[in-house]
Amino acid sequence: MQLFRKKLNLTGRIVIQLQPDGICAARVVYSSAHPVVEFISFFPFGSATPAATLEKAAKELHAERYECIHLLNTHEYQLLSVEAPNVPVEELKTAVRWRLKDMLDFHIDDATIDVLDVPVDKSAANRNHAMYAVAARNQLIEQRQAMFANADFYLRVIDIPEMAQRNVAALLEKNDRGIALLSFDAEGGLLTLSHRGELYLSRRIDVSLMQLGTSDAELKTGYLERVTLEIQRSLDHFERQYHFITLSKLQLAPFAAVTELKEHLAENLYIPCEMLDLTSILDCVKVPELTAPETQQRYFMALGAALRLEETVL
């Protein structure tokens, strides 16, 4: 979903994400080596409204300097897999909209739609393939447009976590092999499987960051087993559907209790499982606070969205 209007004197991009307790802002600049994190900022809501907090952030961040990427949260959109329609590119969104009319939990006329293609095996290019459709309520999109405009942010792009995580995964790929990446936040887990910078499979896992951090040993074991089962099923499906891609490993995005999860997954998966440190793929010299796993977890998706490179969509 891209939103355009004319604006002059811009010096780059900034990502804004509304989290349950405040607003995350991040800016990344590509360099000849690792992408450089220019800054990260968090603006807690406290007793203020999200709109008032966004206006405060705009002033402190000098919003007039940047075009803005806004990252939606999980509950604000639906990501659905559909069979790719056999139509010209210019008719694609219309054709997908028709297919989505019975799949959404709200009326199709109230939906803003975008599509993400899933590449096929080049040796079997004529076979039907899937693509992802992103659907969000028009009302939400319009509210966010107004909210950002009132705060004087130039809202250029609305993005989703799956694509932000795909951007991080692209920096982890080696030797032409695919990568699985797993992250958690207050809303649950997100598993993405990607190859050559393309998202092939995405799965939501109904286990939150808070649940994984519980001190109740019995409950924690149950959550770890649930996560493991979901990953096993997803890997099996991926292997059947995309047999032409070999996965190198599963990377775990940083959070406080990641070590226990890593140990549990390593015992139960057939691919290696490793913990990700963002400082290994990003230049964080300007933001030394990003060495802490808790800080990396908070800004993980915002930084991923800030890595966005593509300028056009279908």
Image: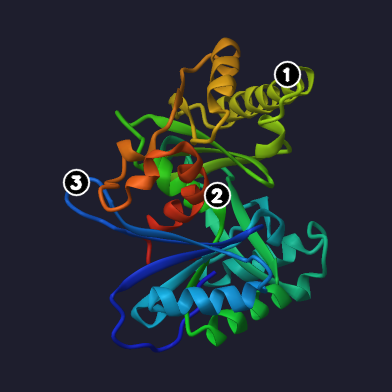
| Residue 247 image label | none
- SS under mark 1: helix
Which marked residue is nearer to the observer: mark 1 or mark 2? 1
Image quarter where the N terminus lies is bottom right
Q: Are marks 3 and 2 in contact (CB under 8 Å)?
A: no
| Residue 162 image label | 2
Q: Are marks 1 and 3 in contact (CB under 8 Å)?
A: no
Asked which quadrant contains residue 76, the reply is bottom right
Q: Residue at x 52, y 72 (%)?
A: 90
Q: Kindly report the distance in space between the C-alpha atoms of the residues bearing marks 3 and 2.
A: 25 Å
Q: Residue at x 28, y 85 (%)?
A: 9
Q: Is residue 196 visible?
A: no
Q: Residue at x 24, y 46 (%)?
A: 34
Q: Earlier in the sequence, mark 3 or mark 2?
A: 3
In x, y percent, where is residue 291?
37, 39
Taking the view exactly as shown, the residue that stands out farthest to the top is 267
User: 10 Å neighbourhood of mark 2: few (<14), some, or many (≥20)?
Assistant: many
Which marked residue is nearer to the observer: mark 1 or mark 3? 1
Q: Report the amino acid beneath label 1.
A: Thr
Asked which quadrant contains residue 279, the reply is top left
Residue with the mark numbered 1: 221
Residue with the mark numbered 3: 33
Give the answer, above or below, for where 244 lies relative to 41: above
Q: Report the amino acid beneath label 3.
A: Ala
In x, y percent, where is residue 239?
56, 25
**Looking at this view, is 31 or 269 the one in front?**
31
Q: Are marks 1 and 2 in contact (CB under 8 Å)?
A: no
Which marked residue is nearer to the observer: mark 3 or mark 2? 3
- SS under mark 3: loop
Give the answer, above or below, for where 70 lies relative to 148: above
**Looking at this view, is 33 or 208 the one in front?**
208
- SS under mark 2: helix
